[in-house]
Amino acid sequence: MPPSDANHSDGSPPGQGVAVLAEALYLTNLLLLPGIAFLGLLGLYLRHHRSAPPLARCHLAQTLTASLWAGLILVVANGLIILLGGYDSPHTWMVVIIYFTTVHATLVLLGTLGLAKAMAGQSFRFPLVGRPCPELNDG
């Protein structure tokens, strides 16, 4: 489905293509191409956040906010590693393992749930960090 959602003859809700693409870029940023996929998500957000249908605006806001939080948490984790003795310290692996088994895995799980909701044409709000989508009531 094209991101512009110009054709709705298949019965999909307006904005579903952009919503799915936003969620896919969020997961790609976390799992495959960090930074590059974020730039793609940022570009998609800047291009569509004002003109997109409510479903797409909701998913764009959620994924961009969650990506920014994920980046901030990663910076904090690196700061903690440095405070605990640097990258040569045995504490490094403790912080890395705790980060990946709790924070990163949770962000991926929530992104997968967001992608499933987008594919179903429903809104999704990330817990704690997600921005409200007042124009939608199904999320």
Image (spheres, rainbow, N blue to C red):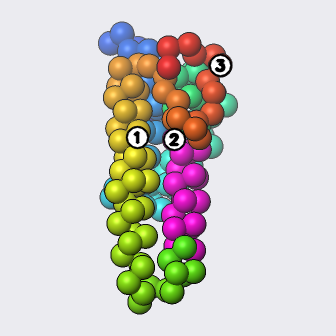
Residue at image location 63% in from the left, 27% down from the top: 132
10 Å crowding of disc 2: few (<14), some (14-19), many (20+): many
Circle 3 SS class: loop
Query: Would you identify the image quadrant in which residue 104 lies?
Result: bottom left
On screen, residue 76 above or below 31: below
Where is residue 16? Give x, y as percent. Answer: 43, 24
Which callout, 3 or 2, points at the residue further toward the start of the chain?
2
**Quadrant for the N terminus in the image:** top left
Magenta stretch: includes residue 72: yes
Type of amino acid under label 1 = Gly
Q: Nearer the viewer, residue 17 or 103?
A: 103
The magenta segment: 63-79
Q: Nearer the viewer, residue 46 or 134?
A: 134
Circle 1 SS class: helix
Which callout, 2 or 1, points at the residue further toward the start of the chain?
2
Residue at image location 57% in from the left, 66% down from the top: 76
Q: Name the residue under label 3.
A: 134
Type of amino acid under label 2 = Thr
Q: Specify the label residue 111 is tagged with.
A: 1
Do the CB atoms of the residues marked 2 and 1 lie less than 8 Å apart?
yes
- How far apart marks 1 and 3 lie (CA) works out to 20 Å
- Residue that lies at the very extreme toward the bottom in this rendered image: 88
Q: Mark 2 points at which residue?
A: 63
